[in-house]
Amino acid sequence: MPKPVNKTAAKPATSAAGKRGKPSAPKSVVKPQVAKPKTVSKPKAKRGEQKRLHPRNLHINGYDFPALMVSFPKLKTFVRPTPYGALSIDFADPLAVKNLNAALLKHHYGLAFWDIPKGALCPPIPGRVDYLHYLADLLFEGGKVKRAAAIRALDIGTGANGVYAILGHQVYDWQFVASDINPQSLTNVQRIIDNNPSLQGHLSLRRQQDEKAVFKGIIQASDRFELTLCNPPFHGSLKEASEGSLRKVRNLQLNCGEQPKATSATLNFGGQAAELWCQGGEKQFLTTMIRESHAFAEQCLWFTSLVSKQENLKPCYQALEKLGVDTVKTIEMRQGNKVTRVLAWSFHSQAKRLQWRNQVVSGT
């Protein structure tokens, strides 16, 4: 089982306790105005750094296909040489991507079994684990990142793949509650747990009964979480999701030097209903999440979510300011040409956050 490299974590900027304001992007700190918190900003990536993953990401140098095929022989069927002589797979083929994921999870993260039903979201492992590395940095606030079995995290909308909870436990030893509205998705994640002794007793599943709720009905009175994480449904309708999936497949075909083939707007590549779309799309989901977070402020140290659409950040900042949160951070992540953001907020001062985390990690 892999362990994070003992490097000093990237230092995320923090806000002054008790002040409020509009956060921008991460890393450098902008001087606050009176009665408003520091905003967190991040400079543009330097030339040549656009495709860099987190420094602790095991996939920062790409895929070692020969090693992966040894660990997971089924992958051999899908590996082929590129025009440049390197080995790769057809990333427009859902079955090829699924087998690559299974190989990565076995070779790097010690999973004996991982599978998803046809049509379920097949996530890119490097990008998923990147989110978790940035959450570890967030939690340790510039200090040395450690594996800590006492850390509890809540994965909202885990899907049929369960990869955030799986990777979070395998990499950092965190304990997870994973929720989803789809009972079939939870059944599949339970199947993955049942076939991997390393996960048993460390991941628990809860079904969200209310399609309009996020935390309500999931977080119980006795719960305390150091982190919540979420990859919200991106689209606002099935039609929009189908069109997006079709565009993705065509773009992948073009990137491989192929002419786009006539194909139906299948969701095999992109996920099922609750995984890809909800009424109101990402903006509405984030709005609900932020509003509900206030009711659970004392039970959660950090709330976080991915934000795919940059234009959705401003209304999130406005909603968070109205709630009077202590600290808001925005962390930009890049994988290839794709850019996404982690929006994180806490109702607790930095002093209280450090005290909470230290007590959990030390077991006191």
Image (cartoon, helix red, strand yellow):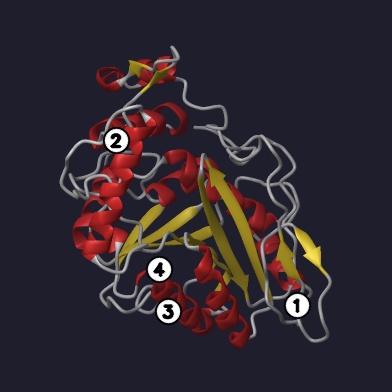
Q: Nearer the viewer, mark 4 or mark 1?
A: 4
Q: Nearer the viewer, residue 110 or 261?
A: 261
Mark 2 surroundings: few (<14), some (14-19) or many (≥20) residues within 10 A: some
Q: Is residue 228 visible?
A: no
- For residue 273, what is the image quadrant? bottom left
- Percent position of residue 111, x then y: 37, 34
Q: Splitting the image into 4 quarters, where does residue 301 fall?
A: bottom right
Residue at the spot of label 1 = 37
Residue 23: where, in percent of width, then height? 68, 71
**Earlier along the polypeptide chain: callout 4 or callout 1?**
1
Q: Helix or strand or loop: what does disc 4 sit on?
A: helix
Q: Which mark is residue 107?
A: none
Type of amino acid at the residue the image marks with label 4: Glu
Work out how far the residue at label 2 is from the one at label 3, CA to CA, in angstroms.
Answer: 33 Å
Please tell me whether mark 1 sits on a helix, a strand or a loop: loop
Q: Which residue position is annotated with label 2?
A: 92
